């Protein structure tokens, strides 16, 4: 969800980074994909914990990946063994859409974050809303950590709680016109879901609350639309939901 625009894990000491390309990277909910980025910094042979890279591989005539490919060992193993055995190869059209999407990643993420902060602030000041859970707001216990880890903003996915609970949330989602009601996230279009009645409905109420998906909680993935349009849509839907 953070994307390499908002967060640079390798600079913070990570060895491997896994991205879902399905979300912001492509940006328009058209493809599924993933990518693994290897920093090349890890010594796979320092212990015997990583024999697939540090010991001979019988299926490749005893080739030792780390010794042979150095800091590309993990990547080559992923291709030669992982892709060979599991077969998850992206189709060319999905790869094409993804590469086109990434060209505008920076522009889009700036707008996503700008809109998300404004929507979160607006909701936090609304009497029909009981709580907003967004690390980009000073009210969040994660605000300082987020500012350090995500210096350009805390992303555009967050939840808020609505007065009136479960029924009000269902009505809110039904009444939103600009927001799409889908389980996806990280789309250029704004998305909404009430987890307790959809993705998390098989859990008990206690489990939903523990997951941050209690009956009164709505999840928003804020897009790059005009901010006035987003606020107007939320305003009319909150009015209908809490009337
Ligand atoms: C993100 C997402 C997927 C695909 O997930 P990957 O990150 O590509 O593994 C599938 N379904 C829904 C509803 C999603 O939000």
Image (cartoon, rainbow, N blue to C red):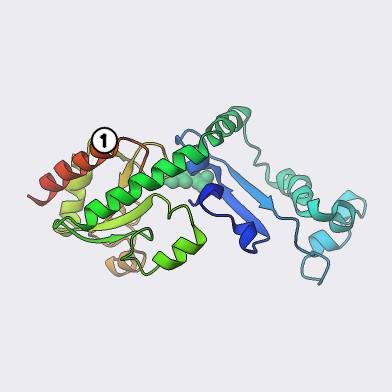
- The extreme right residue here reads 61
Tag 1 residue: 178
In front of the other: 31 or 223: 223
Q: Is residue 76 left or right of residue 146?
A: right
The kind of secondary structure element at disc 1 is loop
Would you say residue 221 is visible in this rendering?
A: no
Residue 141 point in image, percent of width and height: 37, 70
Would you say residue 103 is visible in this rendering?
A: yes
Q: Is residue 1 left or right of residue 12?
A: left
Placement of 182 over or under 206, stated as above or below? above
Identify the residue at image location x=19%, y=39%: 232
- Whether the residue carrying mark 1 lies under 8 Å from ligand 1 is answered with no
Q: Is residue 205 left or right of residue 55?
A: left
Identify the residue at image location x=55%, y=36%: 102
Q: Is residue 113 left or right of residue 228?
A: right
**How many numbered marks, from 0 up?**
1
Identify the residue at image location x=27%, y=66%: 205
Residue 85 point in image, percent of width and height: 72, 47
- The extreme left residue here reads 243
Residue 86 point in image, percent of width and height: 68, 46
In front of the other: 46 or 154: 154
Placement of 182 over or under 148, stated as above or below? above
- Structural crowding at the residue carrying mark 1, measured as other residues with C-alpha within 10 Å and reported as few (<14), some (14–19) or many (≥20): some
Residue 36 point in image, percent of width and height: 65, 50
Identify the residue at image location x=67%, y=50%: 37
Placement of 109 over or under 125, stated as above or below? above
In front of the other: 35 or 100: 100
């Amino acid at each position: 969800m953070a994307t390499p625009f908002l967060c640079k894990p390798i600079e913070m000491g990570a060895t491997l980074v896994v991205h879902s390309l399905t979300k912001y990277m492509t940006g328009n909910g058209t493809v599924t994909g993933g990518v693994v980025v290897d920093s090349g910094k890890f010594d796979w042979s320092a212990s015997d914990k990583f024999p697939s890279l540090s010991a001979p591989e019988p299926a490749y005539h005893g080739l030792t990946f780390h010794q042979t490919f150095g800091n590309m060992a993990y990547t080559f193993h992923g291709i030669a063994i992982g892709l060979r055995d599991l077969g998850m190869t992206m189709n060319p059209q999905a790869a094409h859409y993804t590469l086109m999407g990434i060209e505008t990643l920076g522009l889009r993420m700036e707008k996503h974050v700008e809109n998300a902060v404004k929507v979160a602030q607006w909701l936090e000041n609304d009497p029909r809303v009981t709580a907003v859970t967004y690390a980009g707001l000073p009210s969040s216990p994660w605000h300082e950590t987020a500012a350090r880890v995500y210096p350009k903003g805390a992303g555009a996915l967050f939840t808020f709680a609505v007065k009136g609970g479960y029924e009000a949330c269902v009505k809110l989602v039904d009444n939103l016109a600009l927001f799409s009601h889908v389980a996806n996230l990280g789309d250029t279009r704004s998305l909404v879901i009430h987890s307790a009645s959809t993705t998390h409905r098989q859990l008990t109420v206690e489990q939903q609350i523990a997951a941050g998906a209690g009956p009164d909680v709505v999840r928003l993935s804020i897009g790059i639309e005009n901010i006035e349009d987003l606020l107007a849509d939320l305003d009319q839907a909150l009015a209908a939901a809490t009337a």
